Image: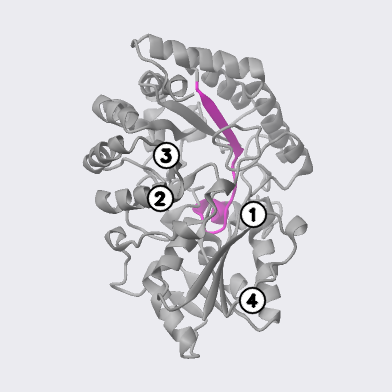
């Protein structure tokens, strides 16, 4: 038996104008470069959960139009895709189905739109795949594959049982970073967020010893790895965070993660992160204004309450030598045309090392999508190819869709010039000097 794990990767903006401007995903290291796609950790994990007597292969399709349809022969194919590439994923699925190969689709989009996905699949996995994968493979062997697989009561997956992902299936030279997951979920539950909170309601931690086993496995296939933590919000649990950083420090790694501004309150943790090799954190600031933040978390409004601390938090983190990639969402209901200037001014004042700007994106399965659909503000329902974080597919509250798209481009032009980048990074280095510290970027150059 041979299973092919196929990842649809390398999402780019749908609009040609946006692509010409260089707006791509994930855009974390340098906005204007085409970043090597990351491998899909979920598929590498399922490969590890596959019985040893089954032959497995991992493949990626980054541009179906250029690469064409895959011609590998498999008994079963498992395909994962983000919403923006789901139509390409369906085309690949249809290609294999036509050849008599059984196809399984899963992931965030399929969990949100299972009936749609079933039009292109032998079976779909709804929610977390780990608890049901073994059963699915066994059903295939017994010629009794079901149409839907979903973890039942009492089958909640624990990260303490996570297998070692099959990093050995990768060609590391294709990537500029590899993924390690240390947690799953996020307590903030923003209405626009299409992340693992759609798969699980619980915030989960992976034991540090299991994380370190994955780190060492990566080092076996890549001498000097750059690691990204595949977490929605790392370091919510401070005890776990400290233990993890202390364990990582001797490995002499460079790594990146996503977190929130609350880490700025914990000087000890920031010091441990720096010593453990943290080079940058992406923080979802979302908006520099009260109007933009109000209501994005329903009744909780945690981020709104942090707004007055945003600037000091950025300075506090960066003065430890950890760069902040501040992520802003343009087009939130409280945003006006003044928001574009406010984002640029915030980046300049704080010296954000990197800035990531996106537009509000109504992903399927999110409260945002349901609300905008009910309000008649989705321009093209089902146009998943526009779920890129850059293409506008809704009517903003306080401007036209065209003005929002133009504002994204104009803001990008102001943020990403060589001069603007130099000003912000000069400020970053001055923040370091204020503490008598040397930049880790200089130390590893």
Residue bearing mark 2: 220
Going from the N terminus, do you reach mark 3 or mark 2 first? 2
Please tell me how many numbered marks the rendered image carries: 4
Instruction: Calculate the distance from the C-alpha at mark 3 to the C-alpha at mark 2.
Output: 22 Å
Residue 241 in picture, x, y percent from top left:
27, 40
Q: Decide if residue 398 is on the left or right side of residue 194.
A: right
Residue 193 in picture, x, y percent from top left:
49, 48
Q: Which mark is residue 257?
A: 3
Toward the viewer: 136 or 397? 136
Going from the N terminus, do you reach mark 2 or mark 1 first? 1
Q: Give the residue displayed 78% in from the left and 38% down from the top.
A: 17
- Displayed quadrant of residue 202: bottom left
Instruction: Calculate the distance from the C-alpha at mark 1 to the C-alpha at mark 3.
Output: 23 Å
Toward the viewer: 352 or 442? 442
Q: Is residue 111 visible?
A: yes
Toward the viewer: 422 or 296? 422
- Region of the chain picked out in magenta, as a range: 352-371
Can residue 356 be found in the magenta stretch? yes
Q: Secondary structure at mark 4?
A: loop
Q: Which mark is residue 84?
A: 1
Foreground disc of the pair 1, 3: 3
Q: Give the residue displayed 55% in from the left and 53% down from the top.
A: 171
Q: Which mark is residue 73?
A: 4
Graded by Cα atoms within 10 Å as few (under 14), some (14 to 19) or many (20 or more), the crowding at tag 2 reads few
Colour scheme employed for the rendering of this structure: one colour
């Amino acid at each position: 038996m041979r299973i092919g794990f196929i990842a649809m990767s390398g999402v780019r903006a749908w609009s040609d104008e946006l692509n010409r401007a260089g707006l791509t995903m994930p855009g974390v290291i340098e906005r204007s470069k085409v970043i090597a796609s990351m491998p899909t950790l979920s598929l590498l994990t399922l490969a590890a959960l596959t019985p040893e007597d089954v032959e497995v292969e991992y493949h990626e399709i980054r541009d179906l139009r250029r690469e064409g349809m895959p011609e590998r022969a498999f008994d079963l194919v498992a395909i994962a895709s983000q919403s923006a590439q789901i139509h390409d994923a369906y085309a690949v699925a249809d290609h294999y189905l036509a050849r008599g190969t059984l196809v399984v689709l899963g992931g965030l989009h399929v969990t949100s739109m299972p009936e749609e996905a079933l039009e292109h699949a032998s079976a779909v996995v709804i929610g977390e795949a780990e608890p049901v994968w073994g059963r699915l493979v066994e059903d295939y062997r017994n010629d009794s594959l079901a149409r839907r697989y979903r973890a039942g009561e009492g089958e909640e997956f624990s990260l303490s049982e996570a297998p070692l992902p099959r990093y050995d299936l990768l060609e590391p030279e294709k990537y500029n970073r590899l993924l390690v997951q240390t947690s799953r979920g996020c307590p903030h539950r923003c209405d626009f967020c299409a992340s693992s909170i759609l798969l699980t309601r619980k915030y989960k931690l992976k034991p540090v010893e299991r994380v370190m086993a994955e780190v060492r496995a990566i080092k076996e296939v890549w001498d000097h790895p750059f690691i990204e933590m595949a977490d929605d919000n790392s370091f919510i649990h401070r005890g776990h965070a400290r233990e993890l950083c202390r364990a990582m420090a001797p490995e002499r790694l460079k790594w990146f993660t996503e977190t929130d501004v609350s880490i700025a309150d914990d000087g000890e943790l920031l010091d441990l992160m720096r010593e453990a090799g943290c080079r940058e954190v992406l923080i979802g600031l979302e908006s520099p204004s009260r109007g933009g933040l109000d209501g994005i978390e329903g009744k909780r409004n945690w981020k709104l309450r942090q707004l007055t601390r945003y600037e000091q938090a950025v300075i506090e983190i960066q003065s430890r030598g950890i760069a902040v990639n501040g992520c802003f969402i343009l087009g939130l209901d409280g945003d006006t045309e003044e928001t574009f200037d406010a984002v640029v001014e915030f980046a300049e004042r704080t010296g954000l090392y990197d800035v990531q700007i996106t537009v509000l994106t109504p992903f399927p399965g999110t409260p945002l999508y349901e609300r905008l659909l009910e309000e008649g503000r989705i321009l093209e329902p089902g146009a998943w190819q526009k779920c890129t974080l850059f293409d506008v597919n809704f009517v903003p509250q306080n401007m036209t869709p065209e003005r929002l798209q133009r504002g994204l481009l104009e803001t990008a032009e102001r943020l990403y010039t060589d001069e603007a980048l130099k000003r912000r990074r000069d400020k970053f280095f001055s923040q370091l000097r204020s503490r008598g510290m040397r930049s880790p970027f200089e130390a590893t150059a």
